[in-house]
Image (tube, grey):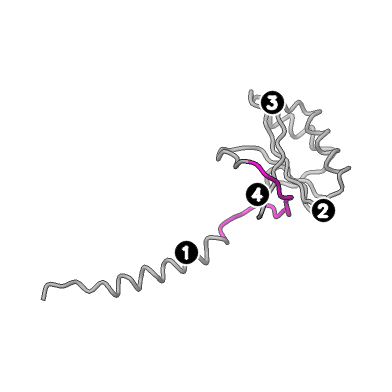
């Protein structure tokens, strides 16, 4: 008999598919923020500096928590030797606008040329 039984192979592949589907969402790391939704195009995949403001008004640079008064000094150190001074701001949609404006002011005072606001894609 020269036939190959592929049923065990298909069974194993289905089990692996289910395992990867369950574990893939758990692999994402970062700071959880409830972003507002807006129209726009996706950001290019490259290394970038992200300032995040969480619901509890804590501010992070990438994943490190920082106080707002220290933000300007830290950003100056990060961007001291970079030509492209670009930063992205993620803020929870329930944060008071005054805090967002304060953080944006600190970013501008640090000499950042470009400030991008990150949002979730608009759900239809």
Compare marks 2 and 3 and give the one earlier in the sequence: 3
- Pick out the residue farthest to the front: 124
> Of tags 4 and 3, which is closer to the observer?
4
**Compared with residue 35, is residue 100 higher up or lower down, i.e. above or below?**
above
Compare marks 4 and 3 and give the one earlier in the sequence: 3
Compare marks 2 and 4 and give the one earlier in the sequence: 2
Q: Quadrant of residue 124?
A: bottom right
Which residue is under mark 1? 20
> Of tags 2 and 4, which is closer to the observer?
4
Q: Is residue 95 magenta?
A: no
Q: Main secondary structure of the magenta part?
A: loop
Crowdedness near tag 2: few (<14), some (14–19) or many (≥20) residues, C-alpha within 10 Å: some
* Tag 4–tag 3 contact (CB < 8 Å): no
Q: Position of residue 65 (x, y in %)?
A: 75, 47
Instruction: Find residue 94 and name its label.
Output: 2
Magenta residue span: 26-40
Callout count: 4
- Pick out the residue farthest to the left: 1
Compare marks 2 and 1 and give the one earlier in the sequence: 1
Q: CA distance from mark 2 to mark 4?
A: 17 Å
Compare marks 1 and 4 and give the one earlier in the sequence: 1
Residue at left 64%, top 23%? Answer: 83
Q: CA distance from mark 4 to mark 3?
A: 33 Å
> Of tags 2 and 1, which is closer to the observer?
2
Q: Position of residue 24 (x, y in %)?
A: 52, 60
Q: Quadrant of the N terminus?
A: bottom left
> Of tags 3 and 1, which is closer to the observer?
1
Which residue is under mark 4? 121
């Amino acid at each position: 008999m020269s036939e190959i039984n592929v049923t065990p192979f298909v069974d194993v592949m289905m089990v692996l598919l289910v395992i990867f589907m369950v574990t893939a969402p758990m692999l994402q790391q970062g700071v959880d923020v409830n972003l507002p939704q807006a129209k726009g195009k996706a950001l290019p995949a490259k290394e970038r500096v992200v300032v995040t403001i969480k619901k509890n008004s804590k501010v992070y640079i990438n994943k490190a928590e920082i106080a707002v008064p220290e933000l300007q000094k830290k950003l100056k150190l990060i961007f001291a030797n970079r030509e492209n001074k670009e930063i992205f701001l993620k803020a929870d949609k329930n944060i008071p606008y005054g805090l967002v404006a304060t953080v944006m002011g600190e970013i501008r005072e640090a000499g950042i040329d470009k400030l991008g606001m990150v949002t979730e894609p608009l759900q239809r």
